[in-house]
Image (cartoon, rainbow, N blue to C red):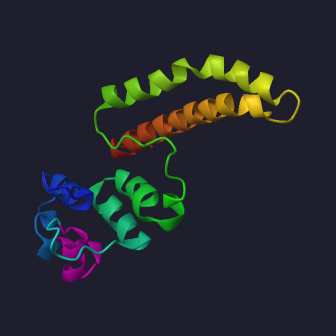
Amino acid sequence: MSENIYKEARLRAAEKNEELKTLESAHEVLLITKEKLGQIEQTDPKKKMTSPNPDDVVAMAKAYNAPELCYYYCSSECPIGAMKKGDGEVVLSDNLAEISASLMSSLHFLDRANDEIHRILADSTVSDDEREKFREIMKTLNNISSGVQSLEVWAKRHGLM
């Protein structure tokens, strides 16, 4: 495909909606100028790519039935989301088995993490010798959160939410 999530989403959506096949007609559906949409979908590294604004992303997500665009934008292009780098990663896949495997893998460690977090926080502090375990637990919780968000993207795409 194209190495640009916005263009890939438009082309997937174009399989069901002819108006999205070309930039010329898609920009009218989205109410984004053709030039700006072309810059957002840019894949040539020698040319300028424009980051969409949040309203553009919402319009594309709705028109393309691609809720993953919102998660991608918030985690990759939004300055606030970029501050959260290192948290679990949302799987932007339409493969329910892949999403399920990722989520189940993280949930497997939840019982152990639950016991550990109670032990660590019992005295309302995190001591120096508990810090690494605390970080591991937070990583597990972030992975679970990401798995839930991945499942939410899938459910929205398939009209279940």
In which quarter of the view is residue 125 placed? Answer: top right
- Percent across and percent down for residue 33 are 24, 82
- Percent across and percent down for residue 95 are 28, 33
Q: Is residue 88 above or below residue 116?
A: below
Q: Is residue 66 above or below residue 141?
A: below
Q: Nearer the viewer, residue 86 or 93?
A: 86
Q: Please give the name of the residue rendered at 78% of the width and 24% of the height, measured from the top-left corner.
A: 118
Farthest right residue in view? 123
Q: Is residue 33 magenta?
A: yes
In which quarter of the view is residue 97 placed? Answer: top left
- Percent across and percent down for residue 123 are 89, 30
Q: Is residue 43 above or below residue 35?
A: above
Prevailing secondary structure class for the magenta stretch in the rendered image: helix
Give the magenta range: 26-42
- Residue 125 appears left or right of 51: right
Q: Please give the name of the residue rendered at 32% of the width and 29% of the height, measured from the top-left corner.
A: 98
Q: Nearer the viewer, residue 41 or 96?
A: 41
Q: Is residue 160 in view?
A: no
- Residue 95 appears left or right of 24: right
Q: Is residue 73 in view?
A: yes
- Residue 148 appears left or right of 64: right
Q: Nearer the viewer, residue 58 or 29?
A: 58
- Percent across and percent down for residue 15 are 12, 52
Q: Quadrant of the C terminus?
A: top left
Q: Is residue 141 above or below residue 71?
A: above
